[in-house]
Image: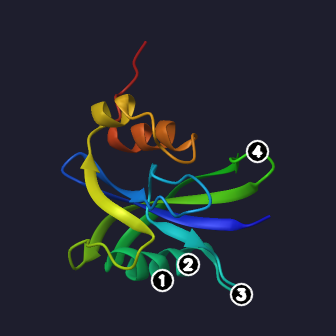
Amino acid sequence: MPEIAIGALIKNGSVLLARRSSERSTHPDQWSLPGGHLEHGEDAETALRRELLEEIGVTPQHWLLAGEFVSESPPGAFATFHVYRVDRWQDSPRLIGDEHTALRWFTAAEIERETQLAPPQLAEMLLNLLRPKTDQKA
């Protein structure tokens, strides 16, 4: 099963999403996190650093594993996603290459309204990253 490392760059309560090109075979024209497949012999953190540099020109400096999930989207195509929260990075995010057509910062409210997130499990994970943790008292 393919493994994919993706990075959620978080700044001022927003997360950076990349719009996938209409030429992509999976999830064309949908918003997703930058990242990509682990190459042979690579661990997820190495893939995250390589992919963020290749796709948006940033070098992550501080990140934490936010979670992992298995997606079957499109149907029949399973992949394991490793999602990282990236709090600090070098350089400004910019589009590189033709995998994405736009970069945009999204707030939690915008994520809740956005219907074109890929893969579908991403929305809940992003909302957990963006929402302030509240102290639950009985």
Q: Secondary structure at mark 1?
A: helix
Check contact, mark 4 vs mark 3: CB within 8 A. no
Residue named by callout 4: 75
Please give the name of the residue rendered at 55% of the width and 63% of the height, measured from the top-left corner: 24
- Above or below, 52 relative to 74: below
Please give the name of the residue rendered at 22% of the width and 79% of the height, measured from the top-left corner: 91
Nearer the N terminus, badge 4 or badge 1? 1
Q: Secondary structure at mark 2?
A: helix
Q: CA distance from mark 3 to mark 1?
A: 13 Å
Camera-nearest residue between 29 and 135: 29
Check contact, mark 2 vs mark 3: CB within 8 A. no
Q: CA distance from mark 4 to mark 3?
A: 27 Å
Residue named by callout 2: 47
Q: CA distance from mark 4 to mark 1?
A: 28 Å
- Above or below, 83 relative to 2: above
Badge 1 amino acid: Arg
Residue 21 lies in what quarter of the image? bottom left
Please give the name of the residue rendered at 62% of the width and 66% of the height, measured from the top-left corner: 4
Residue 132 seen in the figure: no
Residue named by callout 1: 50
Badge 2 amino acid: Ala
Check contact, mark 3 vs mark 1: CB within 8 A. no
Nearer the N terminus, badge 4 or badge 2? 2
Check contact, mark 2 vs mark 1: CB within 8 A. yes
Residue named by callout 3: 41
Q: Secondary structure at mark 4?
A: loop
